[in-house]
Amino acid sequence: MCGIIGVILGDTTSTSAAVEIHDALYLLQHRGQDACGIATCATGGRFFQCKGNGMASKVFHDGSRVADLPGFMGLGHLRYPTAGSSANSEAQPFYVNSPYGICLTHNGNLINAPELREFLDQDAHRHINTESDSELMLNIFANELNETGKARVNANDCFAALERMYKRCVGGWACTAMLAGYGLIGFRDPHGIRPIVLGSKPSEGGSGMDYMMASESVALVQCGYKDFQDIKPGEAVIIEKGKPPVFRQVHPQLGYTPDIFEYVYFARPDTIIDGIDVDESRRNMGFKLAETIKKQLGPEILSSIDVVMPIPETSITSALCVAERLGIEYCQGFVKNRYIFRTFIMPSQKLRQKGVRAKLNAMRKKFEGKNVLLVDDSIVRGTTSREIVLMAREAGAKKVYFSSCAPPITNAHIYGIDLASSSELIAHHRDSQAIAQIIGADDVVYQTLPDLEAACAALSPRDPKTQKFEVGVFCGKYVTPVDASYFEHLERIRGESRKLKVMESAREAVVQGVAGETEVRMAAKGVEVDRHGNVIPADGGDPEDWPTNVGQSNGNGSAVGSANGAASRPGDYETRSRVNSEDQVRVKTSQDISLHNFNDFDGH
């Protein structure tokens, strides 16, 4: 999940595109808090850029850095990391100088990334410097655009390059691109999985029109844009400087299946995505969830419930509708600290557990001596849910029933939202009774998948009867064909990103004197990743003594086992990637030598 923005002003002598992009970043900050960046293009085709890890206020020094980004057009990006690292080198926009000078922002994921990487290396001879799919897509597009052999390109050249790029790339994406001195490009995957919308307004200078593209309509509304138009699946738009937008279908539309998680959780309630009002969809989810609660809990338990409480903030609308339909008092028992990260998108389990307590506070008088029905948007790993139930009981609740506006999440998300690996999902191979026991609730009620789809489809401007969504996380049926090896690829990438974290946890445990045998071996010999993505000690050891709980960090600095609970043994892995205690390499995180980056001013 990322946020993308593109702005081109009608007045090509203006230098203020970054001001609007910077404002829009704050409106989309919920889509990614890991990193952000802005790249602009000024007269003469020169790019200016500022990007780095952190939220917009940090990276842009509360707006003071915007003055360093002159230009009449530009791109903005907010990153939530997908599978892989969260290094500063993966902050966007990405840039290549050949051909023509191109910047790109990307929201999504390519599920044939290994194949694309091999093509770029062996055939296109283009160097890829990070693990980011976004850099792959930029270089695929750049390579195709280079086929023109021209000193200058036109819109037809760009559309043709996109057509060839779409034949190579598989996955879900929404992108904005900027060609130096030329204009902006926006495009979307053939299934319409990731969102992007275009708006316009008269230029403040009185000459021509200003245009903005963004992941959510709220950014356009707040910046004064109107006449919204969703970019269709497989469609691209090119806005040359001083000219109106030109649209073209660069790939046949293979469906119109937006990711349903946008409506469940990711998008702001004051957003409209693909013609579907997010807040209204959450109202429908609440009414339908109430009917499922009636069936599962029955009249006796329902009559004993004193209050319905939302887990702020995404589920507030749905909880109100649940309470209304059940005829039970609605009450907000948790107060949210608005000045903290969304815990779902925190990068580690330990931070998520700590973050829940910092994010929410239970008001004792609302819980004491009561049976409460909690309503949340979804249950992913169960970390947040478990802490919330515990907080409710500590505040005096007698019984705690937990309900989810989304069905059980049982599969990995593969189109740009790194929910978790399947083994980390609490609903993977568990029923609601087992989940209730793990999170400490008296019962857990999930929305059904047909009800969730119907709640959103009913609001579609297309035929509600035929409106479909990307729902693979709930059922394992993705809208694009997915090879089984891709999931192994995802696990290996996740393992790579966990290596240093696990190594640091092991060292800290040794220093604190609380290390077990596994941590001691990791600290002394280093760590490696097996083919399942598990982080394990690098020394191998005697197979008979191989620990059954080795690998992923469980958030407490200790190590946990592979997905099936069995030990990962030396013979289980084909290739290991090793980090040794003695030769661990730290790399400088600044990049793009010719461009201005946040870390260049941060002493790194």
Image (cartoon, helix red, strand yellow):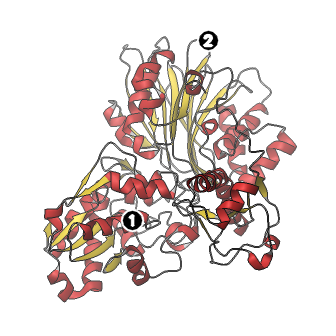
User: Vertical placement of 133 versus 111: above or below?
Assistant: above
Q: Which residue is mark 2?
A: 44
Identified by mark 2, the residue type is Gly
| Residue 414: % across, % down | 59, 59
User: Vertical placement of 394 versus 159: above or below?
Assistant: below
- Outermost residue, front direction? 513
| Residue 176: % across, % down | 55, 36
Q: Which residue is mark 1?
A: 378
Quadrant the C terminus occupies? top right
Q: Neighbour class for label 1 at 10 Å: few (<14), some, many (≥20)?
A: many
Element under label 2? Answer: loop
Res 181 label: none
In depth, the one of 498 and 107 nearer the eye is: 498
| Residue 2: % across, % down | 50, 45
Report the Cα–Cα distance between label 2 and label 1. Answer: 49 Å
Closer to the N terminus: mark 2 or mark 1?
2
In depth, the one of 528 and 453 nearer the eye is: 528
Q: Neighbour class for label 2 at 10 Å: few (<14), some, many (≥20)?
A: few
The residue depicted at 56 percent of the width and 72 percent of the height is: 476
